[in-house]
């Protein structure tokens, strides 16, 4: 299953620098399937947590949409000069690549902060299934690190 979010950030300030391009954007998130063919794929796992799953008793813990909507606008302000410099040099792909990397950074930070403390805690049943060693230093959605390390970006310029 593919899921497309469109995060609407006002980019009109940058559009005057873009010439001869119909479309330029960065795809950010879990862009590949990953995992073994017999195991649940990373993208399936990502979807279950991003949206929640009633049948699997998984609460919604958005690690893509919510952090990007919350932080991307402010983060773009911090790299504004770099973006404009690349756009003025007609390095549109580079500017979009920088935006994509910033998106990846925001998403990965959500894993470190449990999305600024907004993710629902683990259920007691889940905690009880963990070994004592596994409980030490546990962070929600971070066990093997496979989901977090699968966050990437892809540049699209047409």
Image (cartoon, rainbow, N blue to C red):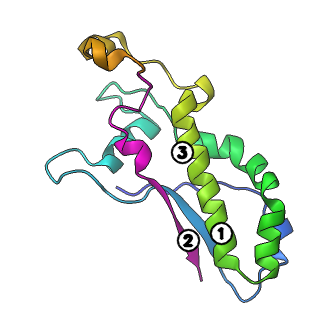
Task: Kindly report the distance in space between the C-alpha atoms of the residues bearing marks 2 and 3.
Answer: 17 Å
Instruction: Name the residue carrying label 2.
Output: 155
Q: Residue at x 61, y 40 (%)?
A: 67
Q: Residue at x 56, y 52 (%)?
A: 104
As helix, strand or loop, the secondary structure at mark 3 comes to loop
Tell me the mark number nearer the camera, choosing from 1 and 3.
1
Closer to us: 89 or 120 = 89
Closer to us: 8 or 26 = 26
Per the rendering, the mark at residue 96 is: 1
Whether the residues at callouts 1 and 2 have beta carbons within 8 Å, the answer is: yes
Q: Residue at x 61, y 68 (%)?
A: 97
In the depicted structure, whether residue 11 falls above or below residue 74: below
Determine which quarter of the picture holds residue 133: top left
As helix, strand or loop, the secondary structure at mark 1 comes to helix
Counting residues from the N terminus, which is met first, the one under dot 1 or under dot 2?
1
In the depicted structure, whether residue 152 falls above or below residue 155: above
* Quarter of the image that includes the C terminus: bottom right
- The answer to whether one can see residue 32 in this image is yes
Asked whether residue 107 is drawn in magenta, I would say no
Asked whether residue 154 is drawn in magenta, I would say yes
Determine which quarter of the picture holds residue 85: bottom right
Q: Which region shows up in magenta?
A: 138-158
Counting from the top left corner in percent of width and height, residue 51 is at 45, 38
Residue closest to the far left? 38
Closer to us: 55 or 109 = 109
């Amino acid at each position: 299953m593919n899921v497309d979010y469109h995060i609407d950030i006002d980019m009109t300030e940058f559009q005057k620098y873009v010439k001869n391009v119909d479309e330029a954007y960065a795809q950010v998130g879990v862009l590949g399937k990953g995992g073994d063919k017999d195991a649940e794929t990373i993208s399936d796992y990502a979807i279950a947590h991003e949206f929640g799953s009633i049948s699997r008793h998984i609460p919604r813990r958005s690690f893509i949409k919510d952090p990007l909507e919350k932080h991307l606008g402010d983060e773009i302000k911090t790299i504004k000069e770099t973006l404009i410099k690349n756009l003025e040099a007609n390095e549109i792909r580079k500017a979009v690549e920088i935006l994509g990397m910033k998106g990846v950074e925001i998403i990965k930070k959500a894993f470190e902060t449990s999305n600024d403390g907004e993710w629902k805690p683990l259920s007691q049943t889940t905690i009880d299934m963990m070994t004592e060693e596994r409980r030490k230093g546990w962070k929600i959605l971070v066990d093997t690190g496979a989901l977090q390390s699968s966050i990437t970006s892809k540049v699209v310029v047409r």
